[in-house]
Image (cartoon, helix red, strand yellow):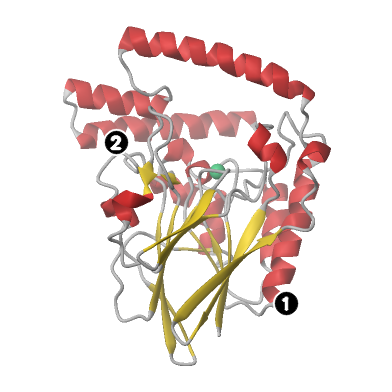
Amino acid sequence: MIRFLYLTDTHIRGTSPANRLDHFPDTLKRKLNEAVDLANQFKVDAVLHGGDVFDVPSPSPSVVGEFLSIFTRLNCPLYGIIGNHDVFAHNPQTLDRTMLGLANRLGIIRIIHPGERIYVEKEGTRVQLTGQHFHVDLDRRDPTLDYCITKENADIAIHMVHGMLMDRRFIEGVAHTIIDQIVGTEADMTLCGHNHLGFRDTERDGKIFLNPGGFVRLSNHPAEMARRPQMVLIEIENAKLKYRKIPLQSAPKGDEVLDRSKGEEAIYREQKLNAIVDEIKQAGQFQYANIHDIIEQLANREGITAPVRDLVMDKIAQAQERLEASES
Ligand SMILES: [Mn+2]
């Protein structure tokens, strides 16, 4: 039997987010240790990570050291894809300047790049692993380019994407892809991250689409309060794929770690912010409201070519990198 353990959005960081009542890094260490123990206990053939390994591209060496030493206890390879939080300015080309890039070079995490196929073979069954990192055009361009893969010389194909895949239509103005658009994929299983709340397990034409939700809860959104972070154990035997969700035992209850009182304030702030964003949108006729989205929209509207747009994105990445360096 070939076994994989899938988890996503670990957002490793050395500090606690504003809404957390606990010491977030300590809780996260316990959870990651549980995941590693489970992987070793089940003798999985690989652990798969859906991206956003780190919360910021370059946390301090002490934080990186503490957390990566948990991963080095694994008795199997750790394969991952790049999330938007792992890299500067959400740009995967900055990987080599990030701590995820360092972990990749040291072989602690093996990053799967688009177009690359990794094979795991055992007892006559051959599994193909592919991955699609986050990038600025994801969920905006033809989704089949990022979500649909072909199965080459394998019994089972598993594809990981750090993108906004949903089981149904989502809020207008938030770039996303729905499963209906990508049912043509040859992946027997598509594993997503990015959306920390996940979506309902979906099966179409015998293909499985999963996002178990983030490994951590960063916000005190009511849905985050209610959910227990979980992983997915995947088992493949005689070219048949099965899976089950494994809730994290060491994850505290939402109301123990998430501050609800700040929730009301946060909701109020969010409403105010949304109102401002609405005004900006109306004034500028921009559909989205973060810096990358605005550049994207500007580029489209003004007929700016992709290389120029990418150059601007790169400059912003460098500026963010300098800013982060001066802060730490
Ligand atoms: Mn994330």
Residue 9 locus on image (x, y percent): 58, 49
User: Does residue 67 appear to the left or right of 79 in the view shown?
Assistant: right
**SS of the residue under disc 1:** helix
Q: Secondary structure at mark 2?
A: helix
Residue 234 locus on image (x, y percent): 56, 71
Tell me if I can see residue 88 in this picture: yes
Tag shown at residue 310: 2
Query: Residue 196, position in %: x, y?
Result: 57, 43
Looking at the rendered image, the disc whose residue lies closer to the viewer, 2 or 1, is: 1
- Disc 1 residue lies near ligand 1 with CB under 8 A: no
Would residue 161 appear left or right of 11 to someone viewing this image? left
Q: Quick check: 21 above or below 73?
A: above
Q: Is residue 51 visible?
A: no
Query: Which of 316 and 275 lies nearest the eye of the viewer?
Result: 275
Asked whether 300 or 256 is in front, the reply is 256
Residue under circle 1?
A: 41
On residue 22, the disc is none
Tell me if mark 2 has few (under 14), some (14-19) or many (20+) residues whose alpha carbon lies within 10 angstroms of its own. some
Image point 58% across, 34% down: which residue?
Answer: 325
Image position, residue 169 (x, y; %): 39, 38
Please give left or right for residue 211 compared with residue 186 in the image.
Answer: right
Which corner quadrant holds the C terminus? top right
Q: Residue at x 43, y 35 (%)?
A: 170
Q: Upstream in the sequence, badge 2 or badge 1?
A: 1
Which residue shows up at 78% across the image and 22% down it?
Answer: 261
Residue 290: name its quadrant: top left
